[in-house]
Image: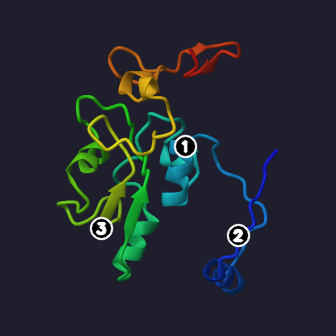
Amino acid sequence: MQRWLAVANPAVDALARAGIRYERASPQSVVCMPSRSTILTGQHPSTHGVWMNGVPLPHDAPSVAAVLRDAGYRTAIVGKAHFEPFLDVFGRFEENTLAAHGTEPESGAHRGFEHLEFATHGAMARCTMHVGLPPSTRGTGRLLPGARRDFQVSADGGGETGAPQVR
């Protein structure tokens, strides 16, 4: 059962009165990376290609942040970006490198965001996102048990349901 906490917030209440407020919303995917990619691109997972966790969002995918930045807005992403796989011991994905090296991308922007403050991403980043996990589970090898030895996400089924990424 979902419980809602009522908190008085005049600024958010004013935004709700002046804009569009959705009473119900359904995500295009219940999985993290496809949902985040849909929010950024405005596209369905079948269009942007991120159909499950571990599949990176293509660099040429559209970005609402890039549109806003091009229109003169300052853009920032604070928290968990997760448009690229977290498990990246070989440093293949830009978000993991950016998380380890600072908040201003050398190229000027990453996916349209000019300022980055990742909660965590990659083995070298600060691990603030996983602060609620026991210390024994805060490690790359234990966060994605569905990865194969070559560090590619496995679609092999497992568990009682035979679902992918379940072991």
Q: Are marks 1 and 2 in contact (CB under 8 Å)?
A: no
Other residues around mark 1 within 10 Å, as few (<14) / some (14–19) / many (≥20): some
Question: Residue 19 appears in which quarter of the rendering?
Answer: bottom right
Image quadrant where one finds the N terminus: top right
> Which numbered disc covers residue 42?
none
Image check: 104 left or right of 133? Answer: left
Identify the residue under disc 2.
7
- Where is residue 98 drawn, in percent x and y? 25, 50
The residue positioned 19% from the left and 61% from the top of the image is: 107
Q: Residue furthest left?
A: 106
Dot 3: element: loop
- Where is residue 86 drawn, in percent x and y? 38, 36
Position above or below: 107 against 8: above
Image check: 29 left or right of 93? Answer: right
Identify the residue under disc 3.
114
Image check: 117 left or right of 24? Answer: left
**First in sequence: mark 3 vs mark 2:** 2
**Residue in the foreground of this view, choosing between 136 and 19:** 136
Identify the residue under disc 1.
32
The residue positioned 38% from the left and 81% from the top of the image is: 71
Marks 1, 2: nearer the viewer: 2
Give, as a three-letter code, the residue at label 1: Cys
Give, as a three-letter code, the residue at label 3: Glu
Position above or below: 132 against 142: below
**First in sequence: mark 1 vs mark 2:** 2
- Where is residue 99 drawn, in percent x and y? 28, 48
Image check: 88 left or right of 54? Answer: left
Dot 2: element: loop
